[in-house]
Image (spheres, rainbow, N blue to C red):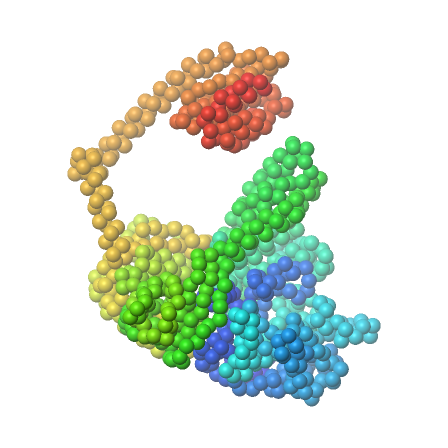
Amino acid sequence: MMTSQEIRQKFLDYFKSKDHLIVPSAPIVLKDDPTLMFSNSGMTQFKDFFLGYKTPTAPRIADTQKCLRVSGKHNDLDDVGRDTYHHTMFEMLGNWSFGDYFKKDAIAFAWELLTEVYGIPKENLYVTIFEGDASENLERDQDAYDFWKSHISEDRIINGNKKDNFWEMGESGPCGPCSEIHIDIRSEEEKAKVSGLELVNNDHPQVVEVWNLVFMEFNRKADKSLEKLPAQHVDTGMGFERLCMALQGKSSNYDTDVFTPLISKVEELSGKKYTGILEDEKDIAIRVVVDHIRAVAFAIADGQLPSSGGAGYVIRRILRRGISYSYRFLDMKEPFLYKLVAVLQEQMGKFFPELEKQGTLVTEVIKSEEESFLKTIENGLIRVEKLIQQTIDNNLKVLPSEEVFELYDTYGFPDDLTRIIAEEKGLTIDEEGFKAEREKQRKRSKDDSAQKVYDWVTLEERDENFVGYDQIEAETYITRYRKVENKDGEFYQVVLSNSPFYPEGGGQVGDKGVLENATESFEVLDTKKENGLIVSLINGLPKDAGALFYAKVNATDRKNSQANHSVTHLLHEALRDVFGTHVEQKSSYVDPNYLRFDFSHFNKMTEEELALVEGKVNQKIKDSIALQEFRNIPIKEAIEKGAMALFGEKYGNNVRMIQFGTSMELCGGTHVKNTSEIGHFKITSESSAAAGIRRIEAISGDKSEEYFKNLEKQITELSQLLKSKDVVRSIEKLIDENASLKAEVEAFKKEKAKGEIGDWKGSYEQKGDKLLLVKRTSLDAGSVKDIVFQLKREIPTSITIILSDADGKPMITVGVSDDLAGIYQAGALIKDLAKEIQGGGGGNPGFATAGGKNLDGLENAYQKALNI
């Protein structure tokens, strides 16, 4: 039986023998495509080739691509674990032709590889072709049918509809008819009962699509019309995990050696045995865990850390789903997923070296996220129990949807865990209400980011160049424009023949500025890169879009942005000098006002280390090091010179290298011509960005100058206030005096409290066989707490209620003596009283406090307390 490593290698070797260039997988995380967060198919990294924006490195290419499908149109997350073949992260084996071979050869290659190289019996295979679609004037793919006839009997060629056999990567973009290859891996007995022909594309777990041959002929425009691409291309994608299932004679992807080493490790760590039963919650949990750890590990290795927004939120959500399943169904209350990373490295490190290189970081980040979320679950359990008790106290059977959704959305507590706990107490959750709350949240999120983008209007054909490395002003023409509508209004995106505007990338924000002609002027609000085009956003449409324009970058913003960008290179080198080569840039952000730099390091920086790093950077600035720029250097040569290449970035064969003395990095951003232009560098903060990741925030240039001017101004003002030039000594004296005064105040409070205790002891009223004290006071919270604890100890069968207005803020404190704690609950009493001051709080059965907003409500609370 072939191992998964052998199956992958045979694919690459076969296409290498057919003159295909074998290229590495692109990062799973996309950093320069505004339409996608992650690579969701093999073709993603080649999209610019299909659209004609870039020239392919070779006419024939093959690879295995890491893919992630957890959002948008392609979302498999909810299916993962509940069947045998859906995954979040998966490998897509693919071969590509860019204007070279087309349907005939693509079909022949696929058939030969499957039947002769892999030895799959021909009688187990079926193929589908596009049947056509009258609504789009698309004819049946007769060519594909005719080519398939020479390889497979006609009764195994099936017509497929537009949904199954016309491939589109999104709402717009490259698309075309496709031909799927399906494999029937059922037993002979099952095949005799029902023909595989009837099960193709019917979600049968053992009659599955294994390979899709897409014939790229069209581009789907924003108005939904189709236009012919400049050339015909082939885009194929074969699911690696499904192929392994077929070749290893298994009925589930999870039974192949792609997953069995991970499953064995989970069994070892959890003590639970995997049986492969689809409906068994324990087995579902194990499948979820081994699937999700792959997605999370690869994403982190490619530079995407879990976070609270964007792609980072998606990764955190996947990881938390895995933790939640293991907590509930594997009884794993301690972090353990991080221990699976080593197994993954052993399995896949040869083909994906980023797992080896970034292994320590991946492990530490996952461990930290597990620890954090397990605490979230523990805290959430307390909140759920409180919510359940409130529901029971109110004689209700259904948990309110708003509170359940708040637990899920605000505190990250899994809704299905809330559901399970509620059912154990004989309660349910308001399912429809919860769905409505989630839909409201989705709509809010969608409305915030909603944008309608129209089709490009192309003007006169001209070359489109970026000239911003050499000039910040340029004569130019608009080559194409399109309208954009969002919540802020109507705007236009333009592409210029000569653009000095730097498009957002490499951590640096896009340029702003002005686009003007003899009669009109438009503000350039932002500049981004999309499918190889530099796209600037302007606040209107010129009356004469074909006129000659003058493009001017905001010079001050550019000057400050590039100073901050150059200083990140110097900072990176300084950190490696101080801490060692384990330090690597993980992300950065550069704008005119400040810079943020995240790097791999496991300890908080000391003041001495911060000063050392800052000093090294400022010395490089003082040394006036001239920029050496290599705009089109072969990547191999750049690496040999010592350039830093960052993991998670996709580099071409030729790259741009930026050098300031011994600092050398691959970078597409704008930079100062000499380090002296930076002026000065100042670190403003150092903190943790994630496990094993430290974050430095800093300023340079104009902002650094402003920083020191403000400091000087503050010191001058302090000196005037203190009437002393020795500011430090004067403040030390004030601190000593303040400490002495505080001690006197505390002593006074204690004396006053002693007096209050004496008065209050004799003020309890008899209420049946119990005693009640209700008092108003202006004592502070600490004093009231001390008094209440003393009184509830010394006065048996008593309830003590103190209402305070200290510092103009309402506060209520309730104490219940120990002998009544089983009858009365301080928390329940205070909950009712706190309504009067528009507040809330809590505690334990014997003691509770509540603060509020309505000081005037203390009187109502006082009267209500008297009537307890």
Considering every residue shown, the one lying at the far top of the view is: 762
- Where is residue 307 drawn, in percent x and y? 48, 54
Q: Is residue 404 above or below residue 99?
A: above
Q: Is residue 159 above or below residue 412?
A: below
Residue at 56 percent across and 61 percent down: it is 71
- Where is residue 39 drawn, in percent x and y? 52, 68
Name the foreground residue: 515 vs 824. Answer: 515
The quadrant the C terminus occupies is top right
Residue at 27 percent across and 64 percent down: it is 555
Residue at 62 percent across and 68 percent down: it is 258
Relative side of 491 to 271, left or right? left
Q: Is residue 729 above or below residue 659?
A: above
Relative side of 738 to 483, left or right? left
The quadrant the N terminus occupies is bottom right
Relative side of 60 to 127, left or right? left
Name the foreground residue: 776 vs 645. Answer: 776
- Where is residue 729 drawn, in percent x and y? 21, 36
- Where is residue 126 drawn, in percent x and y? 71, 78
Considering every residue shown, the one lying at the far bottom of the view is: 150
Name the foreground residue: 51 vs 760. Answer: 51
The quarter of the picture where residue 234 lies is bottom right
- Whether residue 255 can be seen here: no
